[in-house]
Image (cartoon, rainbow, N blue to C red):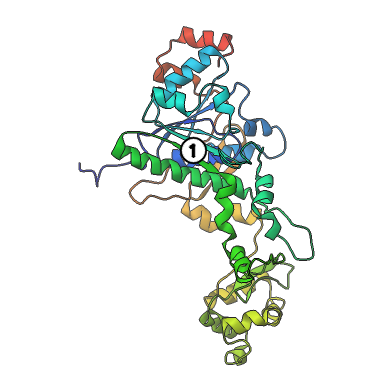
């Protein structure tokens, strides 16, 4: 069987990852690696990582389950001499280590990159922090809301006459986790040519900067003048119509016509074809100049129809739009379910929950089966006995000594 026809589990099959990630950032990176075929061994303190402990409050169990499918779970006390020794054994056999602790946490444990790379020169050591490992803000504690504030994201979110508002999703955490995955796979690619690993790092602050592109464009166009928040309008105030419009049933629909052709389609769909040749609205420049009038034209249509009816009419005309859906609609969306992006799964700890697959799809690898996360230390015996070669007696002693 040649390489092109051989069955594959995923492009990262054969890569072993030591996962010290916690909360969202690091675990999302390693989740994508696991779904791409890597063997991910999640190491937690004896009480479990922070997000697992949050599961006792509210709905935090679901986020932990979402980000930790297809991993193996071990506990290990890295502050214990024997625990540190076992960790070094594991690193010696691994390809990648991922951590998103505070900047100097691994140094304090004596497990930073210089120590681990001396043991395993091929190791790709990946760190994610709030503000980076250098610079005047490096020691600042960071959570998603803090980075949204520091990055400028919060300043542009919300409406002009109201206070700034954080973006609902944990965008900084997940942007950093995605960039960390990219950094790791890039370093693994280079290792194929050089034989050596390296230390890669990603900061949450830098990961979200590119998302400000439209707003930065407006800042540049206004020669450094900071503009007011634009609500649901285009961040660069360079598209019209571009807004969220109310519908007759109390719903909302997002509509954008990003070209003159789209504008003509929209006018035909909403019964305003007489405006197609109207010089006040015939070009993007004139529509942007009369943005409020354009919004009134579109809103007159949306207010006359239910959300789903307005969506159907505009879809028929190939106008870019979308109903504003709630979370319940999303997790039961036929499109996402048919594509396998979400799968309702019987979780052994949390019951029936919607779990996602990685958004990364590889054409020559089969769709990954979702293997639900397990309790802390679920795979201690398998990993420590089969992988490190410890005996049952040694395993019992480690538990007695609170190493695992």
Can you say which quadrant of the picture contains the C terminus? top right
Neighbourhood count class around disc 1 (C-alpha, 10 Å): few under 14, some 14–19, many 20 upward: many
Asked if residue 44 can be seen in this view, the reply is: no
Q: At which x and y percent is residue 76?
A: 54, 20
Q: Which residue is mark 1?
A: 30
Using the image as rendered, state which of residue 265 and residue 186 is in the foreground: 186
Image-quadrant location for residue 117: top left
Percent position of residue 264, x then y: 55, 84
- The vertical placement of 268 against 384, above or below, is below
From this view, report whether residue 182 is shown above or below residue 240.
above
Q: Position of residue 389 (x, y in %)?
A: 40, 15
Secondary structure of residue under mark 1: helix
- Image: 151 above or below 313: above
Of residue 125 and residue 70, the one placed in the foreground of this image is 125
Q: Is residue 268 visible?
A: yes
Picture quadrant where residue 276 is located: bottom right
Q: Residue at x 46, y 23 (%)?
A: 115
Relative to 109, 97 lies left or right:
left
Q: How many marks?
A: 1
Q: Is residue 388 shown left or right of residue 223?
A: left
- Which quadrant is the N terminus positioned in? top left
Residue under the point 63% across and 34% down: 51
Residue 79 placement (x, y as % from top left): 58, 17
């Amino acid at each position: 069987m040649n390489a092109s026809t051989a069955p594959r589990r995923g492009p990262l099959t054969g890569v072993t990852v030591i996962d010290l990630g916690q909360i969202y950032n690091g675990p999302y990176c390693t989740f994508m690696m696991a779904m791409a075929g890597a063997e991910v061994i999640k190491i937690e303190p004896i009480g479990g990582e922070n997000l697992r402990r949050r599961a006792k409050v509210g709905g935090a169990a679901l986020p932990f389950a979402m980000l930790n499918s297809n991993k193996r779970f071990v506990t290990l006390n890295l502050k214990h001499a024997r625990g540190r020794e076992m960790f070094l054994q594991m690193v010696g056999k691994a390809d990648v280590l991922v951590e998103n602790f505070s900047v100097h946490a691994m140094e304090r444990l004596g497990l930073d990159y210089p120590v681990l790379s001396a043991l395993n020169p091929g190791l790709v050591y990946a760190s994610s922090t709030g503000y980076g490992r250098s610079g005047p803000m490096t020691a600042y504690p960071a959570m998603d809301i803090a980075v949204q504030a520091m990055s400028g994201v919060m300043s542009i979110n919300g409406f002009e006459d109201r206070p700034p508002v954080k973006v609902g999703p944990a965008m900084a955490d997940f942007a950093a986790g995605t960039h960390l995955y990219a950094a790791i796979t890039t370093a693994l690619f280079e290792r194929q040519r050089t034989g050596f690993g390296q230390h890669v790092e990603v900061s949450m602050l830098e990961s979200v900067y590119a998302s400000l592109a439209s707003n930065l464009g407006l800042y540049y166009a206004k020669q450094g003048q900071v503009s007011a928040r634009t609500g649901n309008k285009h961040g660069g105030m360079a598209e019209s119509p571009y807004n969220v419009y109310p519908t007759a049933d109390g719903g909302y629909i997002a509509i954008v016509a990003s070209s003159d052709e789209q504008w003509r389609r929209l006018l035909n769909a909403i019964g305003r074809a007489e405006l197609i040749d109207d010089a006040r609205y015939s070009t993007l420049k004139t529509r942007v100049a009369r943005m409020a009038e354009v919004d009134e034209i579109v809103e007159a249509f949306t207010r006359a129809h239910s959300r789903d009816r307005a969506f159907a009419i505009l879809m028929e005309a190939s106008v870019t739009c979308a109903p504003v859906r709630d979370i319940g609609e999303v997790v039961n969306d036929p499109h996402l379910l048919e594509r396998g992006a979400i799968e309702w799964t019987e979780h052994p700890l949390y019951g029936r929950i919607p779990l996602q697959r990685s958004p990364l799809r590889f054409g020559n690898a089969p769709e990954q089966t979702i293997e639900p996360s397990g309790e802390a230390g679920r795979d201690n015996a398998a990993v420590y006995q089969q992988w490190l070669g410890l005996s049952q007696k040694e395993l019992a002693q480690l538990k007695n000594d609170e190493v695992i």
